[in-house]
Image (tube, helix red, strand yellow):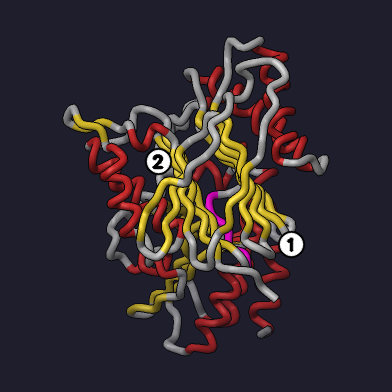
Amino acid sequence: MSKPVDRARRALNETPADRLVGGIGDVLAGSYGITDVELYQVDYRLAELLPLTDGDSITSPGHPAWRAFDHQSPLLTDGVAWMPVTMRGERRGVLRLSPVPDDQEVVNALAEVATALAHEVAAVSAGTDVYRAARRTQRLTLAAEMQWELLPGRSRIRPSFSLAGQLEPAYAVRGDGFDWSDDGERLWLSTINGTGEGVAASLLTSLATHALRNARRAGLSLADQAALADQAIYDLYRGEQHLSALLMELDLRSGMMTVVDAGSPRLVLLRGGEVSEQPLEAQFPLGMFEATDYHEQKFPLELGDRVFVVSDGVVEATGQHMRYGETALDRFLRRTGPMAPLDAVRSLIGDLRAFVAGDLVDDAVVVCLDWTGPQP
């Protein structure tokens, strides 16, 4: 590791949380003569790159900033460098630097600095609103604020899998949500198709998410996780409120998928370029009845399989008096094969927005999981 990178890391650790970009800017100015440093964060809709301080947002797909973001590789053009700001697969945005010499060693060092910045932004975000506030183009509804705070992230890459998810309408989502966690041997993924309106819907999803996390962290089986969340919701709402969920557990050594379908969103498998809906045993939604007994089912994933989970807000999205429908969904999912999961999710959401000619009205959640196989 180069000395400038060492100094930049120290600056990130020692600089106040709200001045991270300025802290590394001071180091880069002294080490490389770089005088312009700006962080562009991707917004909640995955549609704009927004500057942390002053300047215009970047929306054009052909812009070097978006090319660096999409391809996840540094881009140097006319002395301006665009560096992906990414942490463990979580794409936060890009770092603009100039002037930057056409020197691969310098570019590699700057890429390390951008990655270190991504880690530090993640570390300090719990204690400052600077970075969250700067990546929104409009005010989030209260329900949407609550939903986004529940999420574990929007994308993740591990040796055995790649994963991404998105909520829509991003600035006004109410009850849909997702959650994930892995311990190196297993991946847990839950997708919730919420019900209700406004804060009431967000509170219901929050209760379900925290109940599932509580059961998962206690080491309970997938069926018991569903049962605990079911009972927690029923105890509070006595059956008057319930929600649909799909719980999945992937064995990262074998590719065996365990599923509990609690009135769940749709699970679609993309294998070898062909799309098929995975048949699931439909069980009662969480909180509908007292002491529901849930059952697990298993099916194996093959190397290279892609799994999509979509809520009914995707299939039922309406434009010009027509539903988006399962046929259009399957056709589009088939085209996402070469894309990374986050790009696949973003492309599907973009296609839905084009279909409805604007933002979605009803909540929709899309999650994409790639199984890349057991690792030594």
Q: Which mark is residue 14?
A: 1
Instruction: Looking at the picture, tell me which residue is in the foreground, 292 or 356.
Output: 292
Q: Position of residue 170 (x, y in %)?
A: 43, 37
- Under circle 1, the secondary element is helix
Residue furthest out toward the left: 320
Do labels 2 and 1 touch, CB within 8 Å?
A: no
Mark 2 or 1: the one toward you:
2
Q: Of callouts 2 and 1, which one flags the residue occurring earlier in the amino acid sequence?
A: 1
Residue at image location 53% in from the left, 31% down from the top: 282
Q: Quadrant of residue 300?
A: bottom right
Counting other residues with Cα less than 10 Å from the Cα at mark 2, is it few (<14), some (14-19), or many (20 or more)? some
Residue at image location 43% in from the left, 61% down from the top: 271
User: Where is mark 2, residue-wise?
Assistant: 137
Counting other residues with Cα less than 10 Å from the Cα at mark 1, is it few (<14), some (14-19), or many (20 or more)? few
Alpha carbon distance from label 2 to label 1:
30 Å
Lateral position of residue 115 relative to residue 127, left or right? left
Instruction: Looking at the picture, tell me which residue is in the foreground, 309 or 152.
Output: 309
Lateral position of residue 235 relative to residue 26, left or right? right
Magenta segment: 154-159
Q: Amino acid at mark 2?
A: Thr
Q: Quadrant of the N terminus?
A: bottom right
Q: Magenta segment: does it hold 108?
A: no
> Taking the image as drawn, is residue 177 in sight?
yes
